[in-house]
Amino acid sequence: MKRILILGGGFAGVYVARRLEKLLRPDEASIQLVNQENYLVYQPMLPEVISGSIGITDIVSPIRHLCPRTQLVMREVQGIDLARKVVTVSPGFRPRQLELPYDYLVIALGGVTNFFGMPGMIEHGKPFRTLADALALRNHLIQVLEEADLETDAELRRKLLTFVVAGGGFSGVELMAELNDFVLNVKRSYPRLREEQVRCVLVHPKEHILPEMDQQLALFAERILKARGVEIVANDRVTAATSEKAVLKSGVEIPCKTLASTVPSAVPEVLQKLDCKKDKGRLVASSAMELVGYEGQVWAVGDCAAASTVAGNPVPPTAQHATRAAELVADNIAAAMRGGTARGFAFEGLGKLASLGHFSAIAEIMGVRVSGFPAWVLWRGIYLMKMPGLNRKVRIGLDWLVALVFPPDLVQIKAAKDAGIVRQHFDAGEAVFHQGDLGDNVYIIERGQCEVLRREEHVADLGPGDYFGEMAVLGNVSRNATVRAVVATDVLLIPRTDFHQLKTSVPAFGSVFEDLARKRAEANQKRSD
Amino acid sequence: MKRILILGGGFAGVYVARRLEKLLRPDEASIQLVNQENYLVYQPMLPEVISGSIGITDIVSPIRHLCPRTQLVMREVQGIDLARKVVTVSPGFRPRQLELPYDYLVIALGGVTNFFGMPGMIEHGKPFRTLADALALRNHLIQVLEEADLETDAELRRKLLTFVVAGGGFSGVELMAELNDFVLNVKRSYPRLREEQVRCVLVHPKEHILPEMDQQLALFAERILKARGVEIVANDRVTAATSEKAVLKSGVEIPCKTLASTVPSAVPEVLQKLDCKKDKGRLVASSAMELVGYEGQVWAVGDCAAASTVAGNPVPPTAQHATRAAELVADNIAAAMRGGTARGFAFEGLGKLASLGHFSAIAEIMGVRVSGFPAWVLWRGIYLMKMPGLNRKVRIGLDWLVALVFPPDLVQIKAAKDAGIVRQHFDAGEAVFHQGDLGDNVYIIERGQCEVLRREEHVADLGPGDYFGEMAVLGNVSRNATVRAVVATDVLLIPRTDFHQLKTSVPAFGSVFEDLARKRAEANQKRSD
């Protein structure tokens, strides 16, 4: 019995498995699929997670239901050895890696967000690609609205109510449309924000958004977005971010607390190490989707592959192409097993769709251009039809029905604790904490300078590598001084629980802080005497 | 204008605010409500999050929709100063605390799970009280099923398929019923688990479960649960846990990877510091729900309060009592403001309901006992009726309808990254990692002993306070040795990203590991020479 191994559970990977289940008898081959999540994300509907118009679990489909005969391995791919024909995956409950040998391999690992070369984006940019990204962005939006409702400082309130999206391609436009609708809609539930101005900015590197679309439709989309209050910044791109602003290539700075980004896309790290022919990092595949140099053995499909159709056109990274290319791969694997010949990919696309939210969309289907409400109906109809499984179709249909009647939700769902150690940025003059505050965190200065004030009197300066806040945590009392940034400063914040665990287990770590606390306590004593 | 401040957004807090909005004119008083979440959790339906039969956002209601005139402060209560009449709440985007002064204060902070005195429960027990707890438990259940499907070791597979719930009160029984149904249902989607035995154990300190219920109904519930395969361990309690087992008071050990607990409940830490009369930690209130010593100024209501009805019966911690006591508090605040007299609490309860899942329940309403399907219909009818807001009623009704037709979902929703630094337990003979594995974490031994093996040859022993795994992380290569626990060992695991941040910012922390790595590299060099 042959072993077929599929890496990735996006459209490409899942559709290879589904087709293989139809083509092959159970005794012909075993099928394994490796994916970190146990579900397929229905990407076209991902922006709707923001408004909650589709239930969170309805936008994804369990892979086990979609391909019941395939063995799902819910782990991360950590290594691909093309010579030994073995894939290594991350450990589960036991800290042991698992090796999966294969006869036929399908690489369909998709893309990842890569903020390399964009300072501050990892800390402050919000990627928008996975379900977790979408949920995190939704929670963040609700958080800034809640905080804006409380905030008395007008400047900070303006920052909290400014939302920047980087990238004006399909996903950027759909995200901006949904985000803008959601914020304007739920703002009504915040009494103090009703009169406040919301600023939504879409930054796009080209002259017009949606460059893949017919220009007339793209211009229609721009008009619709502008009419709803979205600012479009053309011919510019986001190059850096701080916790206070987005920095554009032109030098323009947009003060904001929300910077979402649908770009740039890169191939997963594990593929970067792979020794094969590449095009801008993507794996070069033939028009039969075979990995060059490993024909009849390894296939690459979906966003991580660079392939051309038999007519010579590059295959774009869309769901309609991925699902069809995946079915071709399954056919070609069956052919390789049974001694048939491989077919080439001839699909050239049926059309393009972009939702603009609020009963409007644009569509270009087999040469026909549609915009506005008819395109919106088309958008919903086509994507609902394409959604695999009756279960999901019914649930999403009902979700849409309910969303037409009731206002969107503003429930903030936190499924896990916040990450432990985080970075924070303070501008010159901002206080990290005030004397008398309760102490919860220890801070370490990474970059910048802070001053320590006791009863408004300057007592010390702190620079990179200096720690502070440890006295309050060690003694569990309130802050005995104010610490204020003198210049723009980045600090690393260690929460109390993480701090105590580290202190107990790494004596060297703990003693650094204990020595410091003792010295500072003595200095205080002298000052008081 | 008077300032009314409500602490807590459970049934008690929200119902005080709702009633106050009806009783008072907008110019009479400002109403503020402090809660860490921006929603009210509909506790009776919380177990349904496990099976996903109700959408995750449908089980909660946005507080802003429930009491639109109340200002919601989405922060944590950090201090209550009854003398100065000021409440301090946690910082938001700026690391600054906020002080909220009040004229009238309502303390309705509910309960928290407190595993104090139960070793290992904080690390390995799964509390079940909040929406985040329910989501985390659901994700954990799916994780163990996925891992069990992959696992080849029969003993570990048995542990993965054993589910223990501590506490046989209302919430424990409803949780166990739902959990058991869910696991048995979704197990069908895991081909390798179809034939496997699932073990569900309910541990209860008394002779019979549901001691608050009529005994005949409690016995009915026991029969139903047993018929569905649940083991009930009576007259025993969970006292400790490791990552491998639940330890009971009787000395019995249940090997398992899932230990959920609905007990014990304690009052939040911030109330423990409060200087007022207490009963087992709870704030003693009069039958008018006034905090003793602060009559006409501070009220305590809900699970954090100890009060009696005018007939002298203690007020039990249920939703029906909390909502009615809350309305009484609102009436009494209005009376205090307008010079009226306070009323006492006379409500003695309408009845008791417990869902047993799978179309069965038990109910005891105004003296009438119902069990089985009629009680299940009653359960759903009553709780749907009591759910505040038409929006939620419709959504939950539709959710229930869809859940009757389609199988439950097994989608694992992760809204955030896993917490950084965690503890892991290894039994004697278990390997922490193997030579050749890829290195992702640094480990510190907290308790126990490990041996280091290179090509099966013993090269070193490691004890408490020793670190290992740092070479792989520093050099970013694969593990150059196997580390195995010699006795039962607890290790602290620091993920690579946290490790690198700490190393860069705390030179003392980094140099400990660098020195160690250098010494070990030299030792290896000598060994090779």
Image: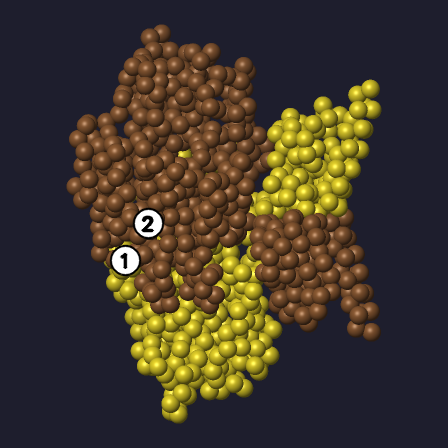
Chain colours: A brown, B yellow
**Image quarter (top left, top right, bottom left or bottom right) of the C terminus of chain B:** top right
**Percent coordinates x, y for residue B369 in the rendering:** 31, 67
Q: Which mark is residue A407?
A: 1
Give the labeled residue for mark 2: A230
**Residue B159 image label:** none
Residue at 58% x, 49% y: name it. Answer: A422
Image-based side of A416 in relation to B241, left or right: left
SS for tag 2? strand
Say if B209 sits above or below B325 in the image. Answer: above
Q: Nearer the viewer, residue B204 or A47?
A: A47
Total labels drawn:
2
Answer yes or no: is residue B525 visible. Answer: yes
- Locate residue A522: give its quadrant: bottom right
User: Could you say where residue A465 lies in the image, as x and y percent from the top left?
Assistant: 71, 49
What amino acid is labelled 1 in the image?
Answer: Pro
Give the chain letter at badge 1.
Answer: A
Q: Label 2 sits on what residue type? A: Val
> Which residue does the image show at 78% across and 26% down from the upper left?
B524
Judging depth in this view, the residue of A445 and A277 nearest the camera is A445
Classed neighbour count for the residue bearing mark 2: other residues with Cα under 10 Å, few (<14), some (14–19), many (≥20): many
Element type at mark 1: loop
- Whole-percent x, y for residue A277 in the image: 48, 16
> Taking A525 as reference, is B383 left or right?
left
Nearest to the observer: residue A252 or residue A100: A252
Nearest the viewer among A228 and A78 is A228
Sequence-earlier tag: 2 or 1 = 2
Considering only vertical position in the picture, is A188 above or below B481? below
Chain letter for the residue marked with disc 2 in the picture: A
Above or below, comparing residue A344 to residue B430 in the picture? above
